[in-house]
């Protein structure tokens, strides 16, 4: 079964989230505050904050669903794995809220997100 992985890149200025096919390394869907359509929806040029992270997650979820149409609709039913606590350790706790906002947005859009670091099988978030 194909596994998808959520990768987050958070800088002082921008947030980028990618869903990648773990087996092939193919980029399935991406969203970023660098994009004109997302960037223009925020005031004061603040593109790296929890509100922006939630918007990135929402756009990413929709793009993943569109990508799944070309996959016969099966991709959206599969799990997206995220090792959020490991990412927080690497990137720092000040970015944890933004990471969780992306995950929560994916979940609220109906995608199944599995947090890999909570247990061997990873409970749904």
Image: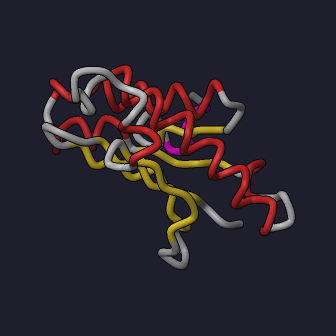
Answer above or below: position of 40 versus 81: above
Q: Position of residue 82 (x, y in %)?
A: 45, 44
The extreme bottom residue here reads 24
Q: Is residue 123 magenta?
A: yes
Residue in view at x 16 percent, y 44 percent: 90
Q: Is residue 45 magenta?
A: no
Residue in view at x 47 percent, y 30 percent: 55
Name the quadrant of the N terminus. bottom right
Magenta region, main secondary structure = loop
Is residue 6 rendered to the left or right of residue 68?
Answer: left
In which quadrant of the rendered view does residue 21 lie?
bottom right
Seen from the viewer's position, the closer of residues 39 and 26 is 39
Q: Position of residue 2 (x, y in %)?
A: 66, 66
Residue in view at x 31 percent, y 35 percent: 85
Q: Position of residue 17 (x, y in %)?
A: 41, 48
Is residue 68 rendered to the left or right of residue 98?
Answer: right
Seen from the viewer's position, the closer of residues 39 and 48 is 39
Colouring style: secondary structure
Q: Position of residue 6 (x, y in %)?
A: 46, 50
Name the quadrant of the C terminus. top right
Is residue 71 rendered to the left or right of residue 56?
Answer: right
Q: How many marks?
A: 0
Is residue 69 rendered to the left or right of residue 117?
Answer: right
Answer above or below: position of 9 versus 41: below
Residue in view at x 28 percent, y 49 percent: 9
Stretch in magenta: 120-124
Answer above or below: position of 10 versus 20: above
């Amino acid at each position: 079964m194909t596994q998808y992985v959520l990768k987050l890149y958070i800088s002082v200025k921008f947030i980028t989230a990618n869903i990648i096919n773990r087996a092939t390394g193919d980029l399935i869907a991406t969203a970023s505050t660098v994009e004109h359509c997302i960037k223009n929806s925020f005031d004061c040029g603040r593109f790296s904050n929890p509100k922006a992270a939630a918007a990135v997650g929402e756009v990413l979820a929709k793009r993943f669903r569109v990508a799944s149409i070309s996959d016969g609709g099966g991709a959206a039913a599969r799990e997206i794995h995220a090792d959020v606590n490991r990412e927080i350790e690497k990137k720092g706790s000040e970015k944890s809220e933004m990471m969780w906002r992306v995950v929560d947005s994916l979940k609220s859009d109906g995608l199944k997100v599995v947090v890999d670091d909570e247990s061997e099988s990873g409970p749904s978030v």
